[in-house]
Amino acid sequence: MIVETEDIPGAKVPEPNERVLKVVMSPEIGNYEKLTVLVSIISPGNSTGYHTHGSDEIMYVATGRGEGVVDGETKKIRVDSLIYAAKGVKHEVKNAGDETLKLICFYSPPIKPAGYFEEAINKAKEYFT
């Protein structure tokens, strides 16, 4: 399977954590059972907000630069940075640049649908069917 992530419709999260979430692969959309793959597109000056998940998350910085915070530790991030947040560990990504910061996020086990993520799943289901 080859997926053009740019074509997948996303769910827009409003400020102060403005970003677009696009679900690329997940059990809910029926194209992969073992993990969830999500693209998070973060506008300049915005962030993901400090949060946790019930799954491990690995984030790859595809574009942009900013700061990553994992369990209270802050580091600068840029293209090709990798961030790991274990299940239950608080984390945040902040776009400190003047261009879009794009993360490719991998959740294992697959993340449970809720909130804007659930909206993104529903948009992806429409796209993939």
Image: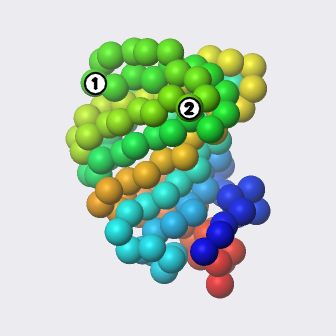
- Confirm whether residue 13 shows in the render: no
Q: Residue furthest bottom?
A: 129
Residue 14 spot, x, y in % from top left: 63, 40
The answer to which of 30 and 54 lies nearer the viewer is: 30
Q: Element type at marker 2?
A: loop
- The colour scheme used here is rainbow
**Residue lying at 26% horizontally and 40% vertically, measured from the top left:** 86
Q: In the image, what residue type sits under mark 1?
A: Asp
Query: How far is mark 2 from mark 1, CA to CA?
Result: 21 Å
Residue 65 spot, x, y in % from top left: 62, 22
Where, quadrant-wise, is the C terminus in this rendering? Answer: bottom right
Residue at image mark 1: 71
Apparent side of residue 42 relative to residue 7 in the rendered image (left or right): left
Q: In the image, what residue type sits under mark 2?
A: Asp
Residue at image mark 2: 80
* Above/below status of 23 relative to 57: below
| Residue 46 occupies quadrant | top right
**Residue lying at 57% horizontally and 71% vertically, measured from the top left:** 122
* Above/below status of 42 relative to 22: above
The answer to which of 1 and 75 lies nearer the viewer is: 1
**Residue lying at 32% horizontally and 37% vertically, measured from the top left:** 85
Apparent side of residue 38 relative to residue 63 in the rendered image (left or right): left
- Confirm whether residue 40 shows in the render: yes
Image depth: mark 2 or mark 1 in front: 2
What is the crowding at mark 2: few (fewer than 14 residues within 10 Å), some, or many (at least 20)?
some
* Above/below status of 77 relative to 127: above
Where, quadrant-wise, is the N terminus in this rendering? Answer: bottom right
**Residue lying at 46% horizontally and 68% vertically, measured from the top left:** 26
What is the crowding at mark 1: few (fewer than 14 residues within 10 Å), some, or many (at least 20)?
some
